[in-house]
Image: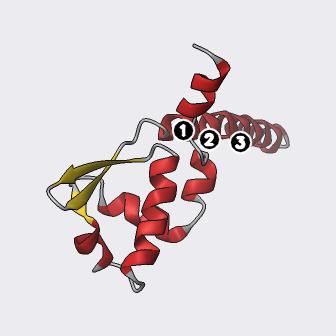
Amino acid sequence: MSKRNQAASLPKHDVFQAIADPTRRGLLRLLVDQEMPVNAISGHFPMTRTAVSKHLRILADAGLVKERKVGRETRYRLDADPLLELKRWLAFYERYWENKLEALKRYVESED
């Protein structure tokens, strides 16, 4: 694959940027079990349909939602695969804190 094709296939936004916003995290929760059109999604948020669409675009650019045209409407659904990157990153720090807590436990118990 050429560098140009590789760049074209890379997400425009990374997963960490995409989920940094609470509205986008809410959109992901809403789309966990269902595909929805933007009109239905907009009813769940105190903002305009245009604002919701912008958030959905960022999520789509990060690969977190997929779009599907049905007639004149666009429907959105969650694609959780990119969240694996986040899970791996958090798992590293989880091990770090578990090790620190285990060391603290050993230290406290050795004082007895």
Nearest to N terminus: mark 2 or mark 3: 2
- Is the residue under label 3 in contact with that under label 2 (CB below 8 Å)? no
Q: Circle 1 — which element?
A: helix
Which residue is denoted by mark 3 in the rendering?
Answer: 97
| Residue at the extreme left of the image, as rendered | 71
Question: Which class describes the residues within 10 Å of circle 3: few (<14), some (14-19), or many (20+)?
Answer: few
What residue is rendered at 22% in x and 51% in y? 69
Number of marks in picture: 3
Closest to the observer: 86 or 78?
78
Q: Nearer the viewer, mark 3 or mark 1?
A: 1
Q: Quadrant of residue 109?
A: top right
83 relative to 36, above or below? above
At 63% from the left and 30% from the top, the residue drawn is 7
The percent position of residue 11, horizontal first and vertical second, equals 56, 40
Residue at far bottom of view: 46
Give amino acid for label 2.
Leu
Q: Which residue is mark 1?
A: 87
Residue visible at 24% across and 57% down in the picture: 75
| Residue that mark 2 sits on | 90
Name the image quarter holding the N terminus: top right
User: x%, y% of residue 35?
Assistant: 22, 54
| Residue 47 relative to residue 68: left or right | right
Residue 80, given in percent of the width and then of the height, sits at: 39, 42
Q: Secondary structure at mark 2?
A: helix
Q: Nearer the viewer, residue 72 or 75?
A: 72
Q: Few, some or many C-alpha atoms within 10 Å of disc 2 (few <14, some 14-19, many ≥20)?
A: few
Q: Is 95 placed left or right of 104 in the picture?
A: left
Residue drawn at 46 percent across, 58 percent down = 57
Residue type (three-letter) at the residue carrying disc 3 = Trp
In the rendered structure, are the residues bearing label 1 and label 2 in contact, judged by CB atoms less than 8 Å apart? yes
